[in-house]
Image (spheres, rainbow, N blue to C red):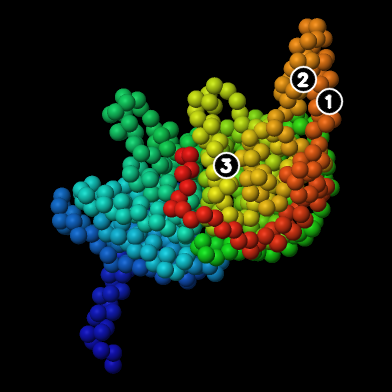
Amino acid sequence: MPDQIMKEKLEEFREKRQGTELGGGLKRIKVQHQKGKLTARERIDAFFDPGTFQELDLFVEHQCRDFGMESKKVPGDGVITGFGEVEGRKVAVYAQDFTALGGTVGEWHGNKICKLYDKAYTMGIPVVGLIDSGGVRAQETLGGWIAYARMFYKQVSYSGVLPQISLILGPCGGGASYSPALTDFIFMTKGGASFMYIAGPALTYSVTSKQYTEEELGGPDVHSKVSGCCDLVADNDRDALEKCRLLLSYLPSNNKEKPPIIDSGDDPFRESPELEDLVPGDEQRPYDMYKVIECIVDKSSFCEIKPEYATQFIIGFARVGGFPIGLLANQPRVLAGAMDLNASDKAARFIRICNSFDVPLVNLVDVPGYLPGIEQERGGIIRHGAKMLHAYVEATTTKIHVVIRKGFAGATHGMCSKEMGADMVYIWPCGAILTMGPKGAAEIVFRKEIQAARPEDRDEITQAMEEEYRRLYYNPFKAASIQQVDEIIEPRQTRGKIYTALKYFWNKREERPWKRNGNMPV
């Protein structure tokens, strides 16, 4: 006969667990579904390998006794925390439960997340936040406010130590929006449910007397195309969770491990003769860098980051012969591939993330320089452009530089030239590394000859001088002659050369002077 006391206790436990796992109840779950959103538990089930989730602190409750809170039950204090496996690799997750008092953050809500971070650190595993919250819980006055500060502290402390990814699957407003901003990557979803802003429509109107919708203030279009805060936009919750699983496959579990090598079945020495037709020899003619990328990386391995922001510059993760890489490339179809304020920020942040987790950096270079103009100068192109220089010099991971066609001016150093620490520099036969483009250089070098000519002859002489400059310097051999290039390669060999460099530099070690931190020109 089973013990009666034990039986009663088990029944009480099972009933309480079932009630707590329902979150805010069936009615609020139905509303969540009507908004096109999964519940917090449904998201966890979709994210982790089946049967692997280990929950923490299921029965934590708020301790607030003000404003009628003593009679309100908030299951799990509005957040689910725990660990599970993604493709067999351990990952920590917290999922805010909008059905439970709007997923608002109180003291114990924040304490659960901070505890999760600390345990993730002891295990050396990534942290993923599934964010769907009304922000700080007003009824607790300072409780939620203090909780956020504790969360910020943990996120910054483990930045560069554990990969941190935030999925904005509902609202994220006020001070709460700084939490995902402190993580490595931010995903948002389409469909009118995903928002992120410092001040919502009501507060914005009260201060500015201007009316904006949530979409206009902080929807996925705003943050993926204008502000640059969002790294990837997904179709819905399930798509966002699947994209997150993919992103994790390129990253190590922590900064003391190497990122995973996965055999893609694609021959690392596969040649691509079509590259010779894809890229025009004339440096002023545009082409699509995406087609070049497709030829070089493992098939279907490119995972682009910030695809709609600063589109003249492409970044993302990929594989070459199974080796994970952080890929950075100029896009000649947009602004001729010139770097500007936003492209520089986009590059510098990605470089630092990759370096944090020892993901090798591969640069496909076809850059005319930094974008000129009064708006760029007043916007601080000097400071923003210098971020790339600082990030690349600071980076100690493997760095591979491939000049596809042109590497002009300071932007070549911004793309990690030999003197900026590139481990291997390759260049195609149609490529050249120059202080500036041939036309501008000829006008400076041959200024006296041009000015001495009759006005009607100056255009012809300028063109002749430009051709002479091209003959002397627009080729890969000048740079190779002074060790700025390690090897001149045929375009079809690019994939194999990158693979070979990755293989030999995979365990690269580089010591730097001790410092608390460098002073990046933020």
Identify the mark nearer the N-term, 3 or 2.
3
Residue 243, by quadrant, is bottom right
Q: Categorize mark 2 by other alpha carbons within 10 Å: few (<14), some (14-19), many (20+).
A: some
- In the rendered structure, find residue 446 and report the number of the disc placed on it: 2
| Mark 2–mark 1 CB contact (< 8 Å) | yes
Residue highlighted by disc 3: 389
Identify the mark nearer the N-term, 2 or 1.
2
SS at mark 1?
helix
Question: Disc 1 to disc 3, how far (Cα)?
Answer: 32 Å
Residue 281 drawn at (x, y percent): 81, 35
**132 or 140: nearer the viewer:** 140
Residue highlighted by disc 1: 468
Type of amino acid at the residue the image marks with label 3: Leu
Q: Which residue lies furthest to the bottom in this view?
A: 1
Q: Categorize mark 1 by other alpha carbons within 10 Å: few (<14), some (14-19), many (20+).
A: some
Residue 474 drawn at (x, y percent): 80, 33
Left or right for 62, reference 181: left
Question: Disc 3 to disc 2, how far (Cα)?
Answer: 31 Å
In which quadrant of the rendered image does the N terminus lie?
bottom left
**Residue at (79, 49) in percent of width and height:** 487
**Residue at (31, 47) in percent of width and height:** 135
> Mark 2, mark 1: which one is toward the viewer?
2
Left or right for 506, reference 356: right
**501 or 150: nearer the viewer:** 501
Question: Disc 2 to disc 1, how far (Cα)?
Answer: 10 Å
> Mark 3, mark 2: which one is toward the viewer?
2
**460 or 80: nearer the viewer:** 460
